[in-house]
Image: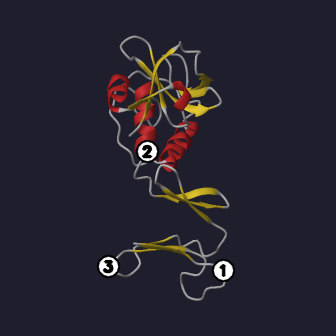
Amino acid sequence: MAIEAFSGTDEGPLKGNLVVYPNTGGVSWASNTGGGGGTLIIQNDGNVVLYGPGGASWSTYTAGGVSKLAASAAIAFVKRQLGKPYLYGGTGPGSYDCSGLMQAAYANAGVGIPRTSSEQYNRSRRISRAELQPGDLVFYYSGISHVAMYVGNNQIIEALKTGTVVRYDSITLPGNPIGYGRVA
């Protein structure tokens, strides 16, 4: 496989694009941005990411768990749900419980995760608090009866209980977390 980044001076329909050519010939993928200015980075984890003026716009993410783009999409989804009411068993779109919100967020990003918080805990890759990144799941209470999404700066977005809405909270306000998981 070959990857080429065309500068703005190249001619033809792929001018200004990142293009992937498989060994079999032809073009298997092109960024189709129509302009230059992107940066292609091969990260320490082996993943390739294309950064443009608006941030990451494409990645391979074959290693290291869910792509940062998927995590970003999941975070964007939960942010759009802020203010919607909590409903036990709720899976959206008008109301959510904690695990229904996480499941819907990752489904929106194209990643399937189980329905309940305990199943989400069992399926996620265990990480430490020091490894926590936006998009990771934070689990609470004995029996793993609550889950929230870490969004950075010691903040989570959660659907906590009846009478509340999807909201921002401190990572420790619902209680001390008992575990952290990365969707893998």
Nearest to the observer: residue 34 or residue 90: 34
Q: Earlier in the sequence, mark 1 or mark 2?
A: 1
The residue at which mark 1 appears reads as 8
Q: Residue at x 32, y 27 (%)?
A: 122
Q: Is residue 40 above or below residue 63?
A: below
Secondary structure beneath dot 1 equals loop
Q: Does the image show residue 166? A: no
Q: Amino acid at mark 3?
A: Thr
Which is closer to the viewer, label 1 or label 2? 2
Residue 61 position in % (x across, y down) = 44, 52
Hey, which quadrant is residue 164 in on the image?
A: top right
Q: Amino acid at mark 1?
A: Gly
Q: Is residue 183 above or below residue 12?
A: above
Q: CA distance from mark 1 to mark 2?
A: 33 Å
Q: The C terminus appears in which quarter of the rendering? A: top left
Specify few, some or many for label 2: CA neighbours under 10 Å numbering under 14, 14-19, or 20 or more. Answer: few
For the view shown, which residue lies furthest in the bottom direction? 11
Q: Is residue 167 left or right of residue 28?
A: right
Which is closer to the viewer, label 3 or label 1? 3
Q: Amino acid at mark 2?
A: Gly
Secondary structure beneath dot 2 equals loop
Q: Are marks 3 and 1 in contact (CB under 8 Å)?
A: no
Q: The N terminus appears in which quarter of the rendering? A: bottom left
Q: CA distance from mark 2 to mark 3?
A: 28 Å
Secondary structure beneath dot 3 equals loop
Hey, which quadrant is residue 172 in on the image?
A: top right
Q: Kindly identify which numbered label has been placed on residue 24.
A: 3
Q: Residue at x 43, y 44 (%)?
A: 64
Residue 58 position in % (x across, y down) = 51, 60
Q: Earlier in the sequence, mark 3 or mark 1?
A: 1
The residue at which mark 2 appears reads as 64
Q: Are marks 1 and 2 in contact (CB under 8 Å)?
A: no
